[in-house]
Structures are given as structure tokens and as C-alpha cells.
Image (spheres, grey):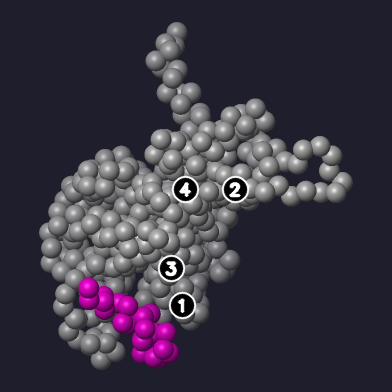
Amino acid sequence: MFSLERDEPRESTRRAVSSGLVLRAVLDEGPLARSHIARRTGLSPASVTDHCYALLGSGLLTEVQPRRSRKAMGRPTVPLDLNTDVGVVGGIHYAAEHATVALVDLRGTVLAERLVRHDGADAGTIVTRSGDVLVELLHREASTLPTPLLGVGVASGGWVDPDRGMIVEHDVLGWQRIPVAELLQDRLGVPVCADSHVRTLLRAEQLFGRSESRASVLGLFVGNIVDAGFALGERPHHGARSRAGAVAHRAVPGSTVPCDCGRTGCLQATVSEWRLVARARELGLIERQPEPGPAARPAIFDLLDVLRAGDPTARSLFVERAELVGQAVAPLIDMFSPDLVLVIEPGITYLPECRTALHRQIAAHSFTVADPSGIVVGSSFMEHALATAGATAFLDALYRDPLGAVPSSRAS
């Protein structure tokens, strides 16, 4: 016999799932009448009315001016839409050389963004400074942005445990067991969620990007850290202890690049941004010595400027990397057979030759996909990928359990 105590969490979970369905339906197709929400979600009209009432009370939904039809009889229906004026979401991403701090609205649109180099600081200083920069952004943009701060999402590469809000291991930064969610929540006074950047970018694609990613999606993030992620339905796979997606040390056939792990030819060592930048410096494409200081621009941005300007040597570097990435992702495609594959790497987004090289190598090395051009794409958010990755750690929680993430007392 089930006790009341055992039944309550189940009811709470059902309410969270249902309110999330309602909010995501409005995100997708709003403004929507309540009757359309019921058809879209499969919830009963009474249930939709209940959830809409609660979401209106939280401030996440708002009623908009009804459209009157000359043929319609009686009272016009009052559509509901997302209330992007309810507040903003903070996003923080910790990369190898810098932190990206951003403010984002409920639709995932980046409203303000700042990049701060680590400049040799320790983990505690970097986390504290990113929280302070977020507060500075809020104050600076206060006259133009909605308030309050609803919550903060944090993302990074490496091993991130969302249940503990912890960056458990980030080899490139040398971080071990950094409780980023707890540190930032104590400093900012709002809920903080943390997860791997590849998993949050998969969720960003599902929430705000390509709808075909919602069936199943595989992602490969190629930066100074290289890692992978997979989502079935709208649930990213975390694996035991949230360690799924560790592909940094997969062997690349023919590569002799030394890796910090002591071996040679690891995927991350072979295709990372640091490797790409080092080669660009050897070839004289960018300055050999980076500008010092916390406000200095990472060298990869300088190389991307050279690429966009049409330099053929820079183009060759990125095309070569795309070929190696294609070889690496092909067996993952065979393993997971996803509906969509996201390769989160700037060359794939900005250079058609990179996409062609990527697709060619996947076709040559995959046993299941002869023409990858229809399913292997770049991220929809490459212009603000790191800001989006950070913020989506919280936005994902909000769209799964809206009233848990933003109770009416905090949004009002």
C-alpha cells in the first residue's frame, strides 16, 4: 500500500511535467489560445486552465490582445504568450582561457555578453569574478533589460555533474571538484544550475533551434576541450556519475601530436583550438605573443578574423581540422544513429569548404550514412555558443519545471 508521502512526489512530478509541456508549447507556437495548448499537449482543457493560471501567476506567461473575427460569436479567446519582460537569465561558461558572462531572455536570445580572461587566476577567483561581472552587466543594462535575475546557468567542458552543481574535473583548467553552483548561488542569491556545455547546447538546439533535434541528436564540441553528447527525446544522456561524452582521448589514426595524458594522437590534442592556434602562429597568420591582461582577446578570435577575410592558409587549416573531425564523428554516428548531428565548431558554420570536407570524411568512414549532408549540421548558436551554453543550463530546468524554477514570489 502506497503512503501519502510516496504519492506526493509523483503528483509533484506530474505537475512539473505538465506545466513544462504548456510553457514549451507556447515557446514553440505562441501566442496560443488555451484550447490550442490543450490540443498541442494532449492535456485536458481543465488541466491546461489550471497550469496556465499558475504560469500567469509566476509571470512566465502573459495574456495578449485577442484577434477578433467578424464571424466569431461570443467572447474572443485570449491568447497566451511568453512574457520575456518577467526577467533575465544569467549565463556563465568557463573555457580554457576565459569566462563568458551573459544575460539571456526566455527565448534564449543573448542580450548582453562580456568575456573575461582567466589570466592565471585560481578557480575560486575565476568563479567569484564571473559572478561579479554578471552583477556589473545587470547594473549596466538595468535601464534596457527586464528585471529581476531569475536564475543562472553555468557550463563548461570536461566532467560536470548537474546533480551536485559541480565541475568535477576540467583537465585543461586543472580544476577538481569545484562546486560552482553553490559558490554562485551564495554570491548571487538566485538558483544556479550547471552542466556540460555540449549537453546544454544540445538542449538549446531542441528548445530554440532545429525542431528535428528533438527526436534524437548527437553533438560534438570542438574547442580547447573536445567532448560529445547525445540526447534521446528531450533528455540528454548523462551516464553513470555524469561522465558520458568523454571522447578527448580517442585515438586519431596517423596523428603523432603529444597529449598531456602521456600518449600521442589523442583527438583533443590533435584538433583542439590550441593546436590550431599554434600552427597558425608558426605560419605567421596571427601574432606569436598574445596580448596580456584579463581583457585580452583570445587568439582563436584573431584566427577566425583571418579566416573570414578569406586567407587561403587559414582556410586550409580549418578544412584539415574538419576532415579529422569527420573521421572522429563517423563511428559515433554509427553507434547512436541519431536524427541530427551537431558539430559545434566555427569552421563548419562559417566555411562551406569545411562542411564539404566534414561530410566527405563522414561518408567515407561511416557504415550507416552515405550522405551526411542532410543530418550533419553546425550549431544554430555559433555566434554566441558559449553564452548560450551557460544560460541553457538554467533555461532547461525552467522549461522542464517552470514553477519550480520561477515561483510567483520571485518573479513578481
Q: Which of 338 and 299 is in front in this view?
A: 299
Q: Splitting the image into 4 quarters, where does residue 263 fall?
A: bottom left
Q: Tell me, yes or no, whether the two marked residues, 2 and 3, touch with CB atoms within 8 Å.
A: no
Write down the quadrant of residue 140 in the picture: bottom left
Upstream in sequence: badge 2 or badge 3: 2
Q: How much space separates mark 3 and mark 1, taking CA atoms?
A: 9 Å
Q: Which mark is residue 81?
A: 2
How much space separates mark 4 and mark 2, taking CA atoms?
12 Å
Magenta segment? 295-318
Could you tell me how far apart the alpha carbons at marks 2 and 3 are, in whole angstroms?
27 Å
Which of the two discs, 3 and 1, labels the residue nearer the N terminus?
A: 1
Q: Earlier in the sequence, mark 4 or mark 1?
A: 4
The answer to whether residue 1 of the structure is visible from this angle is yes
Sequence-first disc among 3 and 4: 4
Q: Nearer the viewer, mark 4 or mark 1?
A: 4
Residue named by callout 3: 382
Q: Answer few, some or many: residues within 10 Å of disc 2's Cα (few below 14, many 20 plus, some between 14 and 19).
A: many
- The kind of residue on which mark 3 rests is Met
Residue receiving disc 1 = 350
Is label 3 in contact with label 1 (beta carbons under 8 Å)? yes
113 lies left or right of 132: right
